[in-house]
Every structure is written in structure tokens, then in C-alpha cells.
Image (spheres, rainbow, N blue to C red):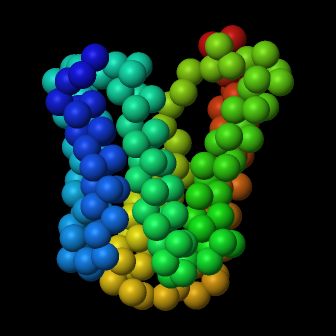
Amino acid sequence: MLNLSNILSLSRAGFALAFLQDNVAIRVLAIILAMVSDFLDGYLARLSHSTTQFGAILDPIMDKFFVFFVGGILYLEDRLGGWELSALISRDISLCLFGLFLLLMGSWNNYECKALWWGKITTVLQFCILIGLALHFMFPWYVYLIFVLMAACAFLELVMRYKRCGETGS
């Protein structure tokens, strides 16, 4: 279960902890390393034919842990407002809502989790915003609104995938 790809995924927890240091260079380096590990973990797993269900779950969990932890630190430092942090993680909120929908529909065990197109875009933009915030750049409100719109698109993508899978029986 613990292969190179999964170790790369887990490394994002360590990179997040680097944000406990109030040092711009360390923080930017931590974000860049988190981005590289996020790209490499899945790529190496597919390349070496060592993809696992554990890895498919671990990768997005570590992405979320990184963004939540770093966002929380920036919030506590008053560099990110409450609504901005909520907008930044709104895709993850929409995933939780979809998970609740699956539970209510009794479809949780039958649903195959796969990466979302909108999710990939959101993750890249989250990392970019975090780099900007680490460099003390302040973003206008509409940048955060984009995250809310992408969360809505991700939710719609999930619903459409669910509907398609229900129609095909898979």
C-alpha cells in the first residue's frame, strides 16, 4: 500500500507543516513542492502501473489537507478573510454535499470516485492563490468568486456523472 506515489502524496502533510514558519521563501518552496508532489504522485503511479484505490483516495485527501492547513494558517494571520477561505475551499464543500447526496440516495457503495476536470483546475488555482498570499499579495473579491463558480461546476459535473452512471448501470 505504501509505494512511492503514496509517499509523495503523504509528503504534502510535511509541506503544509512548513507553513508554521513565518518565512516567505520556505512557504513558497513548500507550495511549489506540494504542487510537484501532486503532479508526480499520480503520474508515477500510472507510469509504474501501481495505482491503488488507497492512492486514489489519499491523493485528494492530502491536497485538501494542504489547502485547509495553509488556508487556516493564513486566516489566523489575518491574511485571508473568512469568506475568502470559504470560497477557496468551496469545491471541497460541494464534494461533501455530493457525498451527502450519495448517502441519502443509498448509492455511496456503488459510486466510483474519479478525478474531476473542475477539481484539477481548482487545485491548480488554489496553489497559485496560496503562492500569491505567501508573497503577501492581496487578491480582489472576484478572484475568490471564481472558486465558488468552479465549485458549482464541479458539483454539476458530479451530478451529471451520477446520472450517466445510473442510466448505464455502471
Tell me the residue at 34%/19% (across/down): 52
Q: Quadrant of the N terminus?
A: top left
Query: Does any portion of residue 43 appear in the rendered image?
Result: no
Residue 11 to residue 162: above or below:
below
Q: Is residue 106 left or right of residue 71?
A: right
Query: Where is residue 44 drawn, in percent x and y?
Result: 19, 34
Instruction: Specify the quadrant of the image occupied by residue 2.
Output: top left
Query: Does any portion of residue 80 appear in the rendered image?
Result: yes
Q: Is residue 73 left or right of residue 166?
A: left
Residue 32 to residue 109: above or below:
below
Tell me the residue at 25%/77% (across/down): 23
> 53 or 121, which is in the foreground?
53
Instruction: Specify the quadrant of the image occupied by residue 112.
Output: top right
Residue lying furthest right: 104
> 69 or 96, which is in the foreground?
69
Query: Where is residue 170 drawn, in percent x and y?
Result: 63, 13
Residue 63 to residue 21: above or below:
above
Residue 118 to residue 60: above or below:
below
Q: Is residue 103 left or right of residue 25?
A: right
Tell me the residue at 35%/27% (across/down): 55
Query: Where is residue 59 drawn, in percent x and y?
Result: 38, 37
> 57 or 47, which is in the foreground?
57
Number of numbered labels in the structure image = 0
Instruction: Specify the quadrant of the image occupied by residue 145.
Output: bottom right
Query: Where is residue 36 drawn, in percent x and y?
Result: 23, 53
